[in-house]
Image: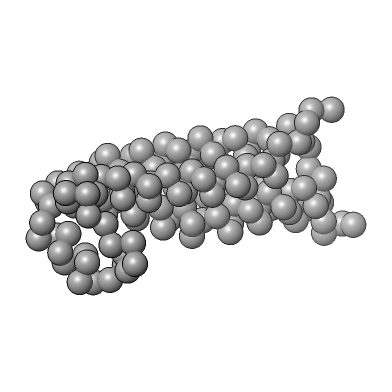
Amino acid sequence: MPTNYSIYAIPAFWLLSLLPHNYAVYTITAANNGKWDNANPRSSAWDKQLQATVPAACYERYERAEAAHKNGMENLALFATAIVLGNMAALDVGKLNSVAAEVLALRALYNVVYVTVGDARMSFARTAIWAVSVGCCFYLIVQAGHVLAVR
């Protein structure tokens, strides 16, 4: 029987979701003479200052990186629920591992596409990647539900 790595995918997902934030801070700090307001990084005054002091393309990339970070954190609960329910239902370990790996790969791709694609038409690729990753989570939840319903 293969080793079950699916539970380890939960902190991996969290780390993948944190990477865009780290990139955003690095990007905006580099464009803003090393300045970063760590005491109040979400204030509207800081945001307005960034808009006024950094190039527009840099600020837009910063915004997209922060949005990718927030989306990852928002989707972490769904992913963790799917993995935990899959393990509770004792789903096939190979299936759990492969779906977990697929979601992690999709999250990494999602982050890259979100941060780098600023074109409105091309942004739908990001939406498609997100939808497939959510579908993978729903797949595990439904499979677990089928097993747990008859126990």
Q: Residue at image x 59%, y 35%? A: 101
Q: Residue lying farthest bottom?
A: 44
Q: How many marks?
A: 0
Task: Tell me, yes or no, if residue 73 can be seen here.
Answer: yes
Q: Quadrant of residue 8?
A: top right
Say left or right for 136 vs 53. Answer: right
- Image location (x, y in percent) of residue 17: 47, 48
Locate the N terminus and report the quarter of the image it occupies.
Answer: top right
Residue 135 in sight here: no
The quadrant of the image that shows the C terminus is: bottom right
Q: Residue at (45%, 38%) from the top-left corner?
A: 108
Residue occupying image coordinates x 46% and y 52%? 72
Between 85 and 18, the one nearer to me in the picture: 18
Percent from the top left, x then y, of residue 49?
15, 64
Q: Residue furthest right?
A: 151
Q: Residue 46: x, y in percent?
A: 22, 66
- Residue 136: image location, x then y, percent: 58, 44
Describe residue 60's horizontal placement relative to residue 147 as left or right: left
